[in-house]
Image (cartoon, rainbow, N blue to C red):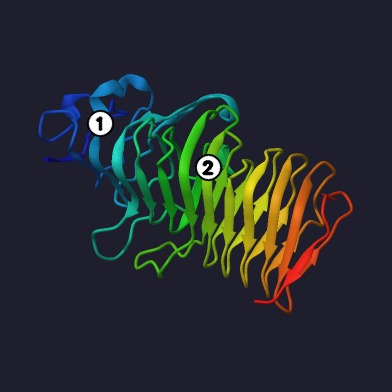
Amino acid sequence: MSLKNLIATSGPVAFSATTNWPSGAAPANGDDVVFRNSSVDVLGSDETGTTTTGFATLTIERSYLGKIGQFGNPIEVSQTYLKVEAIKVYIGRHTGGLPVPNGSSRIMLDLAAVASTIYVESTSPSYSSAEHGIPSVLLKSNHADTVYNVIEGRVGIAFFAGDTSQQASAVNVGPTAASQFGNNMPAEVYIGAGLALASLKVRNGGYAQIKNAPVDIDIMKGGRVEHFGTGNVTGEIEIFTGGEYILRKDGGTIDKIIVHDGAHYDESKAPPGCIVTDVELVGANPKWTKNSNVTKTNQETTRGN
């Protein structure tokens, strides 16, 4: 595999243009592609085409300060992602010393129909005033085996209303260990209604705001999930000690919610429309903040740890 490092000197540039790569050739299947030490913007769209499928790795380091992808007007309905396919994707990786760069304030990737494993190790804390409230990293994918791991920073997945028919196997939010070169930002993930997802796990200070309906949701210690939308959750939502689940759905059915000792299930802000079939309380002190807007089909059950 060859290492192809994007250090363009003028721009914005087309990803597939051979003159933008030191090797004189655009990336091909099996390559390791790196964005580093540049502030040149990279155009999005399908102009990358099939020439950018099947990379072994795609790494966007924090020393890359350009923007990837484009917004139209209005932003909410007009976006152009850079379409790339890679087996492993690393965003926010730092390989240098101090001071640590903030990284790109806009990374928009459409990972298309390849099974990818994505690691977001950090994101830029900044964004332009026109993009206020939009995460600096925006991703989407359309393969059922794709896995997202967001360790630190703000990430949108299928964020916009037009990001429909997307899919992934798992989204994992929050670090497993402290980040060495982080921006001291917690992991925050914003998932749109267009992502079909099998598993969501949130832990260690992670936060997820979701509009879709994962099959299963696990909220571990320090994790927090705020749930909007109308989709049906056909598996289980399990809230472990130190976790919190906030129900704000205005429709759909949730088959089962399990609340462990020291966990919190909060439905106080839920509008009318959602149905919860079963609630199981585990241990001596599970917390359930109830709301009559939420229809409970069955009586809650309790069991020991």
Secondary structure beneath disc 1?
Answer: loop
Q: How many marks?
A: 2
- Of the residues tagged 2 and 1, which is closer to the observer? 2
Disc 1 crowd, CA 10 A, few/some/many (<14, 14-19, 20+): few
Q: Is residue 189 left or right of residue 64?
A: right
Q: Say what amino acid the circle numbered 2 marks.
A: Leu
The extreme bottom residue here reads: 284
Give the residue drawn at x 43%, y 59%.
151
Residue 12 quadrant: top left
Q: Up-down: is 33 above or below 187?
A: above
Q: Is residue 235 left or right of residue 79?
A: right
Kindly identify which residue carries mark 2: 197
Q: Amino acid at mark 1?
A: Ser
Circle 2 crowding by C-alpha within 10 Å: few under 14, some 14–19, many from 20:
many
Checking the image for residue 10, the label placed there is 1
For this rendering, which residue is in front, 187 or 283? 283
Q: Determine which quarter of the picture holds residue 287.
A: bottom right
Q: Residue at x 39, y 30 (%)?
A: 112
Q: Is residue 205 left or right of residue 60?
A: right
Q: Residue at x 38, y 38 (%)?
A: 67
User: Image height check: is 255 above or below 207?
Assistant: above
Looking at the rendered structure, the secondary structure element under dot 2 is strand
Q: At which x and y percent is residue 170?
A: 47, 48
Q: CA distance from mark 2 to mark 1?
A: 39 Å
Residue 280 higher or lower than 229, as above or below: below
* Quadrant housing the N terminus: top left
Question: Picture coordinates of residue 228 (x, y %)?
Answer: 69, 44
